[in-house]
């Protein structure tokens, strides 16, 4: 049983390691957190974790070959480009055109931060490739003596690690925003929008390679 807890800690640290790099999800979390505080930022991360869980479940059930078809990859790339471009442009417009960005109020429900995070993660093919390469390889490293449900529990520790890091990001941005002025938020929001457009361009070049 001691081996199980050692592996649990290893898988949780793996989840944290997967969540640390700054990508479209983290940029969106930072943007939402600066504008609306903890909950909008956390909901973006929660939506992304939901998509991560779907990818993990498909790989766990052996359905990953379906997502490796060219037509599926092209569809995901195209959808990801549209989503990231829209978010990038709207973020830059908000940074320079909106009168006041720093607000003590939560975001309005119609802005749907959860679904934004979910779609961003679900439509990013690199998210799947990341899971397929890291998680798929990690599953193979688990002893065959373990029952399937133990493998499933260990897999959930990866999700737990990602959730812990997302909570950390949401809290950090929430408290950091109280120490800065509206001009700083405006600049950081604009940079986040530029970063989202940069990821959209990256996906576009990958789409050209696939085609």
Image: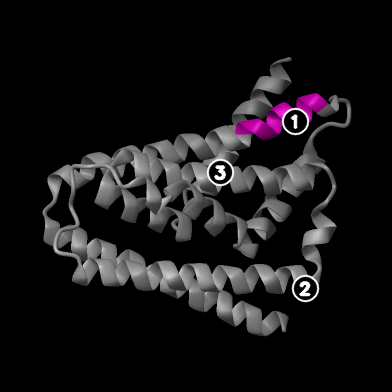
Q: Position of residue 21 (x, y in %)?
A: 47, 54
What residue did someone put label 1 on? 152
Q: Does residue 1 sit above or below 129 in this rendering?
A: above
Q: Which residue is mark 2?
A: 71
Q: What count of labels does the image hold?
A: 3
On the image, the x and y values in percent for residue 51 come to: 61, 48
Residue at (77% x, 41% y) in the render: 139
Left or right of 24 on screen, residue 14: right
**Is most of the magenta stretch helix, strand or loop?**
helix
Residue 151 falls within the magenta-colored stretch = yes
Give the secondary structure at mark 2. Answer: helix
Residue at the disc numbered 3:
49
Q: Which residues are magenta?
A: 149-157
Q: Earlier in the sequence, mark 2 or mark 1?
A: 2
- Gap between marks 3 and 1, in whole Å? 16 Å
Residue 42: x and y in percent read 41, 41
Gap between marks 3 and 2 measured at Cα: 25 Å
Q: Residue furthest front?
A: 110
- Which residue is at a point 53% across and 48% down the rendered structure image? 48
């Amino acid at each position: 049983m001691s081996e199980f807890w050692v592996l649990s800690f290893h898988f949780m640290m793996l989840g944290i390691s997967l969540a640390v790099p700054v990508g479209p999800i983290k940029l969106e979390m930072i943007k939402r957190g600066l504008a609306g505080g903890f909950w909008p930022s956390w909901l973006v991360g929660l939506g992304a974790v939901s998509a991560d869980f779907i990818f993990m479940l498909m790989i766990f059930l052996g359905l990953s070959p379906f997502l490796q078809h060219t037509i599926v990859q092209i569809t995901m790339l195209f959808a990801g480009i549209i989503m990231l471009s829209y978010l990038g442009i709207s973020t830059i417009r908000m940074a320079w055109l909106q009168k006041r960005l720093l607000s003590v109020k939560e975001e309005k429900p119609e802005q749907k931060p959860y679904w934004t995070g979910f779609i961003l993660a679900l439509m990013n093919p690199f998210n799947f490739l990341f899971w397929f390469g890291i998680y798929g390889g990690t599953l193979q490293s688990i002893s065959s003596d373990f029952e399937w449900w133990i493998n499933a529990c260990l897999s959930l520790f990866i999700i737990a690690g990602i959730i812990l890091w997302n909570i950390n990001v949401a809290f950090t941005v929430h408290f950091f925003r109280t120490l800065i002025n509206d001009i700083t938020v405006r600049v950081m929001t604009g940079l986040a929008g530029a970063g989202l457009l940069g990821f959209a361009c990256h996906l576009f070049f990958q789409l050209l390679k696939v085609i």
